[in-house]
Image: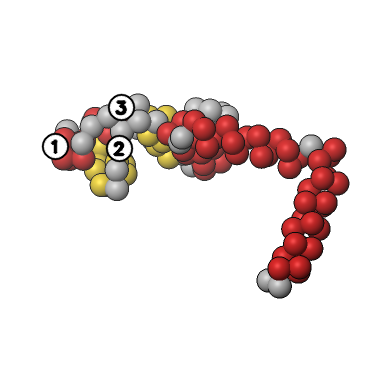
Amino acid sequence: MDEKTRVLYRRARVTVEVLRPCMCQACQRIGRVELHHWRYAYKTKVVRKLPQLALDNTSWLCFTCHNLADSLRAVRDADVHLVGRLERMRAFALDPTNRFRQLTVSASTRANKKREGL
């Protein structure tokens, strides 16, 4: 028999009857897992009336995989141009050939501020 499990759906708690697994569906780690909603397909009002809908578009994930999945959702929902710009900044910052260039820019910026009396 399934047990009653409280699920958070768009900041609303609903109780559903579902067997809570003890293994992460992503990394196969054994331990505590939580439901991760990949997409909220219904309005909260509808899910309160039909709590089983809260299980749609979900996966059971451990804490580590859940955080990673939240990050993926944030990137997916973000502005494409901003994500591209951040990726280029990351690549620039991690490229060892740019280390001297970054130091030079910082030094020249400090020198300019000193000249301007800031």
| Residue under numbered circle 1 | 49
Asked whether 100 or 114 is in front, the reply is 114
Identify the residue at image location x=71%, y=73%: 117
Query: Which quadrant holds the C terminus?
Result: bottom right
First in sequence, mark 1 or 2: give its number.
2
Q: Which mark is residue 56?
A: 3
* Label 1, label 2: how far apart the Cα atoms are: 19 Å
Whole-percent x, y for residue 12 in the image: 25, 47
> Whole-percent x and y of residue 107?
81, 58
Mark 1 or mark 3: name the one nearer the start of the chain.
1
In the rendered view of the protein, which quadrant contains the N terminus? top left
Q: Quadrant of residue 73?
A: top left
Q: Residue at x 65, y 34 (%)?
A: 88
Residue type indicated by callout 3: Asp
Residue drawn where x is 74% and y is 58% of the image:
109
The answer to whether residue 41 of the structure is visible from this angle is yes
Q: For mark 2, what is the residue? A: 3
Judge the density around disc 3: few (<14), some (14-19), many (≥20) Cα neighbours within 10 Å.
Answer: few
Q: Is residue 79 above or below residue 115?
A: above
| Badge 1 element | helix
What is the CA distance from the residue labelled 1 to the residue labelled 3?
15 Å
Q: How is the image coloured?
A: secondary structure
Pointer 2 or 3: first along the chain: 2
Question: Residue 22: in sight, yes or no?
Answer: no
> How many numbered marks does the figure carry?
3
Whether residues under marks 1 and 2 lie with C-beta atoms below 8 angstroms apart, the answer is: no
- The three-letter code of the residue at mark 1 reads Lys
Of badges 2 and 3, the one in the foreground is 3
Mark seen at residue 10: none
Circle 3 SS class:
loop
Q: Secondary structure at mark 2?
A: loop
